[in-house]
Amino acid sequence: MHASLDDKALDIIFRDARTPMHWSDEPVGDDILQKLWDLVKWGPTSANCLPARIKFFKSAAAKEKLRPFVAESNIEKTISAPVCALLSYDIEFYEHLPRLFPDDQSAKTWFNWSVDHATTTAFRNGTLQSGYFIIAARALGLDAAPMSGFDNAAVDAEFFPDGKVKSNMLCGLGIRAEPTPARAPRFDFNEVCEIL
Ligand SMILES: Cc1cc2nc3c(=O)[nH]c(=O)nc-3n(C[C@H](O)[C@H](O)[C@H](O)COP(=O)(O)O)c2cc1C
């Protein structure tokens, strides 16, 4: 076995972490956004394809640009977040494989033969990177509020007009303010897992 995290660390990133409903005023510095990416980038992706593309909406003016596209119930959580990240994925990620997967210069051809295959791969791996993003944010002492309640097509038309990048989810970042609702239950191991 490798070295492992202690219970305190596991509490921070899983057991005690909550999805915020409200935010405190504590700001999030640009340095921590840089640190966040510098962790997220190490999470594994197919052929090291790293399809995630992230825009951090931080200024009040920037966050206002999201308002027209966000579900009513998500507006407060988006606008009052110290930072709201738009987690997206590049469906032409394979163009970067000669650099990102240097051991096989043909890696691009594993994906660019089909738009559907490339898009599914980008979505799968971009979503994985979104998961790494949430856990990395928690590991750095932030709360993360993922949100899929927004108009993806309208966001894509506004922020990615060339059609090569697709939005996946928003994720507020900051320190949560109470109240947070009582925690919902989770499945136990035997309900959803099988050891074969
Ligand atoms: C991909 C994704 C999309 C979500 N979309 C929304 C959303 O649009 N609005 C919202 O209020 N919460 C949203 N959530 C938050 C979940 O409801 C919340 O993380 C879940 O209930 C677990 O809460 P807990 O971390 O406090 O236990 C989303 C979470 C994820 C991972």
Image: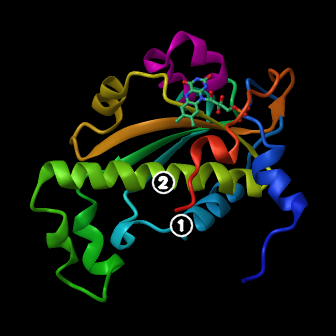
Q: Position of residue 103 (x, y in %)?
A: 30, 89
Q: Secondary structure at mark 1?
A: loop
State whether label 1 is within 8 Å of ligand 1. no
Question: Label 2 crowding class (10 Å Cα cut-off): few <14, some 14-19, many 20+?
Answer: some
Q: Residue at x 24, y 49 (%)?
A: 119
Q: For residue 77: magenta?
A: yes
Q: For residue 126: magenta?
A: no
Outermost residue, bottom side: 103
12 vs 113, left or right, is: right
Name the mark on residue 104: none
Q: Position of residue 139 (x, y in %)?
A: 75, 57
**Whether residue 156 is situated above or below residue 138 in the rendered picture:** above
Q: Residue at x 9, y 61 (%)?
A: 113
**Whether residue 138 is situated above or below residue 37 in the rendered picture:** above
Q: Residue at x 62, y 40 (%)?
A: 191
Q: Which residue is mark 1?
A: 43
